[in-house]
Amino acid sequence: MRTLAALTVAAGLVATAQGKVSFEMCSDALNDFGIEDVILPEFAVAGEKIAVELVQRPNRAIGKGHVRVEVDVEGVKVAHETYELCEVAECHMSAHTLGKSMIWLSLPQAMPAGFETSIKVIVNDHNGAQLSCIDVSGVQVQKPSNNGGKVLRATAEGDKELSLSRNELEFLFDKWAREFGHKFSVAETVKHMRTFAENLEQIALHNKAGHSFTLGLNEFAHLSQEEFAATHFGFKGGETPELTVDREFYQLDVSTGALTDLPEEVDWSKKGAVTPVKNQGSCGSCWSFSTTGALEGAYYLKTGKLVSFSEQELVNCDHVDQGCNGGLMDNAFRWIIENGGLCSEEDYPYKSGSGFAPRTCKVDSCSTVEGSAPQSFVDVKHSEMSLEEAVAQQPVAIAIEADQLAFQFYRKGVLVGSCGSRLDHGVLAVGYGTWTDGKKYWKVKNSWGGTWGMNGYILIQRGKHVRGGECGLLLSASYPVL
């Protein structure tokens, strides 16, 4: 293991052309501010100011407002500033009129250079409503010339060697801890910073390699893969899950797997059928979140009402499954049927995030949501077309293998070729489509909170011709029938 004082990563130089650079809209963001171009210098220098110029053509007249600029390194926010719109642009902009905004942002002296650096620009109107949000990745930052003689050195292959001093590591670790609300003792800080450095190295190497998806330092950056897996999964199926469900409630999947009129794209999270992203915390209760997600979708499609159902009721009362020690979604569907439905999250809130799950069932203290008891449930055939057919109909509970680094630190893009089929994590398939790079994907809702991945979601490759599909997501898919 490399020392904390001199973590070194071999990587290619990120080339940012002087002048206009490419940018992406933030997930689900509008562009009413009409940003057409972003102009950056060829490189920025840590400890100095960077000029961010926007060329915009607003879709409507805009008066007062605010512009927020954020800079992050491998997913950690290291600098941010908010400006009055009048400070950086004209105070009153007419619709469809070309204009410019000039923003100057100071970069921290201890900001690591050479790692994956991105700039986010968020424009809000005077009421706080978002007008536009863009992400500029691949921003090139260099170390200041007086940084103790440390400079980027070209290797024989023409790549760059990126060095991280202890001061820079401590700066980044402190920024990360503050952002995610972590507080550690002195001994814990030493341990977690060492793991943080190791994870940072792996993330940097991945991001420099040009994969179809990027990784980032998130709230789990202080945990090793083993530590993370011990508390954040919970599906008990393995590669070929053995069902313990009563066949009285099981319904055969009669899909033909040969439909040709399926929609090109489906996203139930944009159609009102999916509740906000939840967080299982340090409890292996993923199976309960996958179950409630599928039930929430089915209930919405039947009643037109989106109700957040209780995972805690399943964790406490479904004794076929094992609470924070794992379970199966089909077992949970069976329990809900026998129980006559499920209580709402509001009536029976989730309290097992710390990893402690009291087995005292308080089902008598909450009211079962009327009409929430499934008549049966369906296990989807292990084929892409069958799952597409099911997801086109409603959100579907699925299981995946998620014990890889790519899952722990997934940030955005379509995850390809980074997992197996030893199922260990229950999630929810809410749609499918095609990404901007042409890759087909499944859109999956996770239960690790909204700061993980793409606002709590992940895109997993669709159409991979391997047994069980990418990450084994075809092997244990099911949904309730209301």
Image: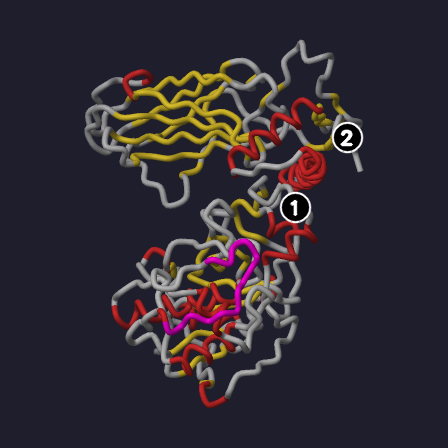
Q: Is residue 470 visible?
A: no
Instruction: Report the amino acid beneath label 2.
Output: Glu
Residue 282 visible here: yes
The residue closer to the viewer here, 419 or 280, is 280
Rounded to the nearest angstrom, the CA distance separating label 1 from label 2 is 33 Å
The quadrant in which residue 15 appears is: top right
Percent coordinates x, y for residue 5 in the rendering: 75, 26
Marks 1 & 2, CB-CB < 8 Å contact: no
The image quadrant that residue 102 belongs to is: top left
The residue that label 2 is drawn on is: 157
* Image coordinates for residue 13, horizontal then vertical, percent: 65, 28
| Residue under the point 52% across and 38% down | 181
Q: Residue 223: which numbered mark, if any?
A: 1
Residue 417 falls left or right of residue 356? right
* Position of 94 relative to 413 (above/below): above
Q: Would you call the spot at circle 1 few (<14 residues within 10 Å), some (14-19), or many (20 or more)?
A: some
Say the numbered circle drawn on residue 123: none
